[in-house]
Image (cartoon, grey):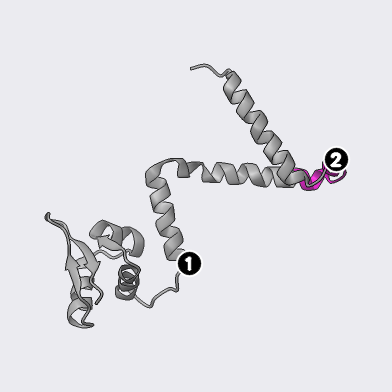
């Protein structure tokens, strides 16, 4: 594997550099020179952000990141049953593995049982195989 940059890669770097220059500089090259420390900080922030977001290139990482964002920006329920119910109310389905990853719930079937029998929610197992995939059926 060669460490040389291809012409296409070099052209792409030039385009990205130009976009960065235009978005950071504001009006002119003189602005960058006069506010060089601010420019460097902006550039460092951009590089750090790019490095942090590289993991989103992989589909699985992107899916997990989206789930975490969805959970982060909702109100935090009191317990696992409430978290699972809220997740189902937003139209999502849930499996045992997802319950474990998202809510640290080791017994999804027990939570589903309580939501069905104690709280009266219509939650169906839509899976055709051994492991359950649960969905809230809303009237």
Quarter of the picture holding the C terminus: bottom left
Between 40 and 30, the residue placed more toward the observer is 30
Between 128 and 65, the residue placed more toward the observer is 128
Residue 33 numbered tag: 2
In the rendered image, which residue does mark 1 sit on?
Answer: 73
Q: Is residue 85 visible?
A: yes
| Side of 17 relative to 117 (left or right) | right
- Picture layout, residue 8 above or below residue 111: above
**Residue drawn 19% across the image and 77% down it:** 116
Between 120 and 98, the residue placed more toward the observer is 120
Q: Is residue 5 visible?
A: no
At which x and y percent is residue 20?
69, 40
Q: Is residue 31 within the magenta segment?
A: yes
**Residue drawn 54% across the image and 45% down it:** 52
> How would you rate the neighbour count of disc 2 (Cα within 10 Å): few for under 14, some for 14-19, many for 20 or more?
few
At which x and y percent is residue 4?
58, 17
- Region in magenta: 28-39
Q: Sequence-wise, which precedes: disc 2 or disc 1?
A: 2
Which quadrant holds residue 10? top right
Taken as a whole, is the magenta stretch helix, strand or loop? helix
At which x and y percent is residue 56?
46, 45
**Residue drawn 41% across the image and 46% down it:** 61
């Amino acid at each position: 594997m060669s460490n040389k940059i291809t012409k296409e890669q070099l052209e792409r770097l030039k385009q990205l550099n130009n976009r960065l220059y235009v978005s950071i500089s504001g009006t002119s090259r003189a602005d960058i020179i006069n506010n060089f420390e601010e420019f460097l900080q902006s550039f460092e922030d951009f590089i750090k952000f790019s490095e942090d977001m590289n993991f989103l290139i992989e589909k699985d990482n992107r899916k997990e990141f989206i789930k975490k964002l969805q959970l982060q920006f909702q109100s935090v329920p009191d317990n696992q049953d409430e978290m699972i119910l809220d997740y189902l109310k937003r139209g999502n389905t849930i499996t045992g593995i997802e319950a474990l990853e998202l809510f640290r719930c080791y017994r999804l079937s027990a939570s589903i049982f309580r939501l069905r029998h104690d709280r009266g929610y219509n939650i169906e197992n839509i899976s055709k195989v051994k492991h359950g995939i649960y969905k809230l059926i809303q009237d």
